Amino acid sequence: MVALHILEALAYISAAVVAPLVWWQIRCVKKQATTSFEDSLTDHYRRIIENIAIEIWLGPDLDTLELEPKKRCREAIYRYIDLCQDQVFLHDNGRITDATWAEWGPGIKGNMSIAAFKEVLNEVQAKLPNSFSEPRKFLSTQQFPCLKPCSNDATTALPNTLQLDRKRTIIRSQLIGLFRWA
């Protein structure tokens, strides 16, 4: 009888020790799954921007490109708008962490302030008025006060340091993409 009480006490103690460990393990697995999911969206973004000419990132509109690069850029920008739709929706539904969103949100607003991106977004909004509502709602908010609302001049849409950092990052990723194919 005493042995049974000892075994019962040991079972309670082990349950009390194991339960927090299981909770911690589940939390770690969930965090890793979220990170992997966010990384997959980042990879998708990088694959899309590889198809956008460097000239577009530096400010001119699509009309400055020849027909084939223009078509490729328009398609890539459309896919980017579609990705933004997913990202905004996923963030609003708690699938994207606030820390990641703090990086992605200003990046989306910055990219959408570029003339070629605005051109494609306006075309999509005109031809598909009931689609892509998430990016439209997001771009119309002042959720990121460090960014001014989109203007016609891409150089005034971002503070100088943020704009320079964004251009450096874009050019660096474009160069990495070029060397990858060499």
Image (cartoon, grey):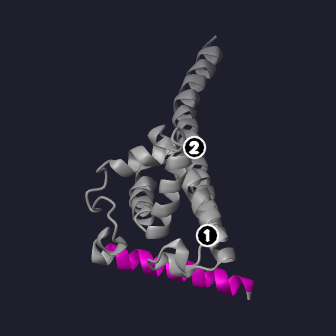
Asked whether 72 falls inside the magenta stretch, the response is no
* Residue reaching furthest to the top: 1
Q: Quadrant of residue 70?
A: bottom right
Position of residue 125 relative to residue 79, above or below, is above
Q: Position of residue 17 (x, y in %)?
A: 53, 34
Q: Amino acid at mark 2?
A: Lys
Q: Quadrant of residue 173?
A: bottom right
Is disc 2 placed on a helix, strand or loop?
Answer: helix
> Depth check: 84 or 97 in front?
84
Disc 1 from disc 2: Cα separation: 36 Å
Position of residue 117 relative to residue 98, above or below, is below
Q: Quadrant of the C terminus?
A: bottom right
Residue at (54%, 72%) from the top-left corner?
A: 62
> Is any atom of residue 25 visible in this view?
yes
Is disc 1 placed on a helix, strand or loop?
Answer: helix
Residue at (52%, 29%) from the top-left corner?
A: 16
Q: Position of residue 7 (x, y in %)?
A: 63, 21
Residue at (46%, 48%) from the top-left corner?
A: 135
> Depth check: 122 or 145 in front?
122
Q: Position of residue 27 (x, y in %)?
A: 53, 42
Disc number for residue 107: none
Q: Position of residue 164 (x, y in %)?
A: 37, 80
Q: Quadrant of the N terminus?
A: top right
Disc 1 designates what residue?
73
Residue stretch in magenta? 162-181
Disc 2 designates what residue?
30
**Magenta highlight: main SS:** helix
Q: Amino acid at mark 1?
A: Cys
Disc 1 crowd rating (10 Å Cα; few below 14, some 14-19, many 20+) is many
